[in-house]
Each structure stands twice: as structure tokens, then as C-alpha cells.
Image (cartoon, helix red, strand yellow):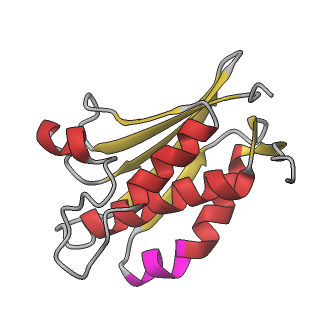
Amino acid sequence: MSKVVYQDVTVRQVVNEALIFCQSHLQEKGILILTGGIPDAITVNCRSQQISQTLFNILLNSCDAIENLPGEKWIRIDAKEDENMVEIRVTDSGLGISTQIQKKIFDPFFTTKQVGQGYGLGLSVAKGIVDIHKGNIFVDADCKNTQFVVQLPKKVAA
């Protein structure tokens, strides 16, 4: 059995990898991506493809949630760090998620999308990946827009 390899990567690199896979989808929907709030120096010890997958799933959900909103459509990605943790926030121009939905949002097969539009696995997979990394993922209910927060330890204990 091969050993799981965690590497130090910049948060910007992980975000850029996620954006590569959904860039055309976002452009097609006319959604502006704002990544100016990611300091270049922030790094995290992780499996970068998995964290990119997590961000990709969040980005796609944000895209689907705001594509039909009137007015400006945007998604902003910010990152910050302290001694032990890295925090990535994905905020979109939506007006939040109800408390009832927040309780179920990470459950496998839970979806608010129309039949045939999604399987309800994206956020469940994202949560599983974050759990493996000994982190946390949640919706910030205090944000006036819709905001997902991914918290990861800077170093994953062996």
C-alpha cells in the first residue's frame, strides 16, 4: 500500500488548480472571480488535488446558486493564516443559505437542485476531504452573502 503524501503548496496554487477546471463554466455564466484576497506566501501541507477538488465543488455550487440572480454575479476567494491554521473563504453574491438547509448541506445525496441538475455529492465529498485533512468546513451564517469556510491545519499530523 502506498503512503499518503502531503506536500507544502501555496493556497494560491490550490485555488488556481480549482479555477482551471471551472473557469469556462464561470465565464459562460458571466460570473466574476475575485482572488485578490489570497496572500502569495500562505502555504498548507495537504494533498493539493484533493483540496482543489474541495474548492472546485464549492465553486460549482456557488456558480449554480447565483447564475440566475439579478445584478452582479461574483465569487470571491480569500485566505488567511495564523500559527497553526489556514482558512480559505469562498463567498458568492448570493444572500445566504437558510439554517434548515445548512443542517443538511454536507449530507450525501442532499440537493436543492432540480432533478437531473445534481446528485448532492459535491459538498459531501468536500467535507470528507476536509475531514481527512483534519480540518473543518462550514457555512458562515454571519456573512450577509453566502460564504463557505474551509479551515485546514498548516501541517497534518502523521
User: Residue 81: x and y, percent?
Assistant: 65, 25
x and y percentages locating residue 89 in the rendered image: 48, 40
Residue positioned 22% across, 38% down in the render: 103
Q: Is residue 149 visible?
A: yes
Residue 13 appears in the figure: no
Q: Is residue 6 shown left or right of residue 139?
A: right
Kindly identify the residue that appears in the image at 36 percent across and 79 percent down: 29
Q: Is residue 23 magenta?
A: yes
Q: Examine the rendered structure and indicate whether residue 60 appears above or below residue 146.
A: below
Along the line of sight, which residue is nearer the eye, 71 or 5? 5
Which secondary structure dominates the residues rendered in magenta? helix
Q: Which residues are magenta?
A: 22-28
Most distant residue in the front direction: 1
Residue 28 is left or right of residue 153, and the answer is left
The C terminus, quarter of image: top right
Q: Is residue 11 above or below residue 135?
A: below
Residue 19 percent coordinates (x, y): 59, 66
Residue 75 highlighted magenta (yes or no): no
What residue sits 77% from the left and 45% below the top?
Answer: 10
- Quarter location, residue 120: bottom left
